[in-house]
Image: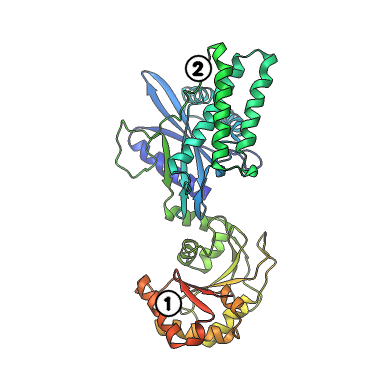
Amino acid sequence: MEVASAEFIKQQIAEHAKHGREVIQIDAKHRGNAGFDNVKIEFYREGRALRARIIQVEVKDYSGHVGFSAFTANAVNLPSSIESLGEVLKVQSFPSPAHRRAATEALRARRFGIEVHTGPTTTLGTAMTSQRGVLAKIERVQRILFDLERIEAALPARRGSEVTAIRDNLLRAIHPDNQRSEVSILRAMKVAEGKVSRLAAPMGVEVGEWRFAPGLNPDPKAAFDPMATFDLRVAHVPQPLIDAAKLASPAGRVIGQNFDIHPLRLAERQGILTPGRYHAEAAPTTFGDGLHIIADSTGKPVVLNQPGRPGSAVFDPRIEAQRLIRQARHQPTSVGKQAVNQPLSPLVDVSHLTPAQIESLTVELVTAAGGNPSLLGQIRLIAPPATMTPKAWGAMFATIAARNRNLSRYLSFKHSVIVGQP
């Protein structure tokens, strides 16, 4: 997903260039793969002076909701993320010395913005916190930490431990390993803000004013308003870029050379596969099917079957069912470099089959499994024929269950997926 995000940023930069705006992209990761996922620097003019704002780009590609605790690089690990960014800027190439000075000054002034790139199944926010609420928490933590930096610079060295204590207590309270509630996290922020204000007042240091710098429109295809800026920005990375990034990986090349990626996208949307980095066996399976085993980002092993696909063998429901059950009995120990500890889950792209063929395959699956619900529970039928609506897809399985009553104790039909009942 980070590769897709980087390509998305290139699209943004190209679109901004059409409107005379200068934006560059830098890789702010350091050893250990920590730091901001991506960084953009947006240049602009204040009178004759060239200025810059640094955009922290975070990539979130989860299935479901993403809350504040997922943004470690922007909150609990912010000090090390900024330290890494400073090291990167020292060796980064810029269009001119003026651009380098502007970027360095933006870092020193903490002129930061934030932009979150999400995947197709990711929702920023939780049942308790809105999308804006999540980003507002990140902004609040950064404001406290930056206020502490300014106080530390003004305090006598002998009192530096007071700043350290406030900082350490805050970072400990918001660390995701502590699993604090939303209320506890907000209380810790409020306590830190009170201590910051009391420490700053005698010295005349102004605190509580820092905000994320507004930046350019994150949607490169949107109509551009020269005066419009966005303070807390969220953008969905286009699906074609996500697909292309997957196919650019070693596992993606295996998938791209042997299968259509569309069924995998459907499996991700239906929660069967977890989006992210895939792993794949470079060689076909050793149990006779000539297919490649794939593992998703959680290590779940699957094998993608496409019966009836043009150029494949003539479809025989009994042979196909026996083959799928044989796959479901297989227990790989690893896929590529990814260790796995669960049985293989056969995915069946049935988009090339007719409703009658799908019914016959379903009946034969129950027979081949010998009524074993755990085996049936590993097999997923996905990707209905293009001519079939979701409603018709569900109605077809209801008809199958009605005509074959022995299926109802083993199968339920939900979300266009056959799920075995244990």
Q: Label 1 neighbourhood size at 10 Å, few (<14), some (14-19), many (20+)? A: some
Residue 381, given in percent of the width and then of the height, sits at: 49, 74
Which quadrant: the C terminus? bottom right
Q: Quadrant of residue 402?
A: bottom left
The residue positioned 53% from the left and 26% from the top of the image is: 107
Q: Quick one: 136 or 290, which is closer to the camera?
A: 136
Across and down, in percent, residue 85 comes to 57, 32
Q: Which of 171 and 342 is in front in this view?
A: 171
Structural crowding at the residue carrying mark 2, measured as other residues with C-alpha within 10 Å and reported as few (<14), some (14–19) or many (≥20): few
Residue 177 seen by the camera: yes
Left or right: 392 in relation to 401: left
Instruction: Give the residue at mark 1.
Output: 352
The x and y percentages for residue 248 are: 53, 55
Q: Name the residue: 30% across, 38% down.
A: 224
Tags 1 and 2 in contact by the CB under 8 Å rule? no
Front one among 172 and 247 = 172
Q: Distance between the residues labelled 1 and 2?
A: 67 Å
In the structure shown, which secondary structural element does the residue marked by tag 1 occupy? loop
Residue 315 in sight in this render:
no
Label 2 sits on what residue type? Glu
- Number of the front mark, 1 or 2: 2
Residue 368 at what x, y percent from top left? 58, 85
Identify the residue at image location x=43%, y=43%.
Answer: 234
